[in-house]
Amino acid sequence: MTMTNKPQETVQKPRKRRAPQEAIPTWIDILVDRIVAAFGTWQLLVLHIIFFAIWVYFDFNINELTFWVSLEAILLSLIILMSQKRQSENDQIRALADFEVDRYAEKQTRVLIEMVREMGKKIGIDEFAVETKTIELEKDKLK
């Protein structure tokens, strides 16, 4: 059975969007991600604790330790912020693509619903009866 009536609305497939320049990882982005991955491990935490214990045990200059720890904290926080910014940009691109796919699916569903209604009219099915039956089925699912 072929349908001769075409739906009123033409449905377009979602376009492939080209990611903005920031979303394409540069060598700096890759380096930042690797540093974040390396510094976010238990092994490095244990290594730091051992290093600090040795520093305190041998009674090295505590002011120098404070300086290096502060510098490390500043650099790591900036690196983590850079990584999170890039991840946020990628998430926005994915969300936009998901939204376009959802819009496309909704349009396709509307077209299918209209086609089913037209087929129902041709074979004499009352639309109100179909909607009433659908509501009853949904109520049964909730029970």
Image (cartoon, rainbow, N blue to C red):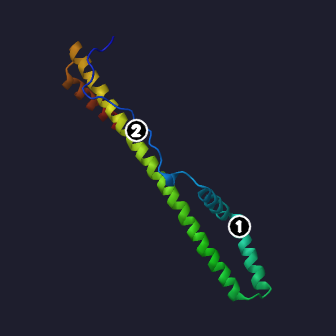
Q: Secondary structure at mark 1?
A: helix
Whole-angstrom CA distance, mark 2 to mark 1, is 42 Å
The x and y percentages for residue 8 are 24, 26
In the rendered view, tell whether residue 85 sits above or below residue 55.
above
Label 2 crowd (10 A; few <14 / some 14-19 / many >=20): some
In the rendered image, which quarter contains the C terminus?
top left
The kind of residue tagged 1 is Leu
In the rendered view, tell whether residue 49 sits above or below residue 118.
below
Circle nearer the N terminus (2, 1): 1
The x and y percentages for residue 89 are 47, 55
The x and y percentages for residue 39 are 66, 65
Q: Which residue is mark 1?
A: 44
In the rendered image, which quarter contains the N terminus?
top left
In the image shown, does 58 or 133 lie closer to the viewer?
58
Total numbered circles: 2
The kind of residue tagged 2 is Val
In the image shown, does 52 or 103 lie closer to the viewer?
103
Q: Which residue is mark 2?
A: 101
The residue located at (50%, 55%) in the rendering is 22
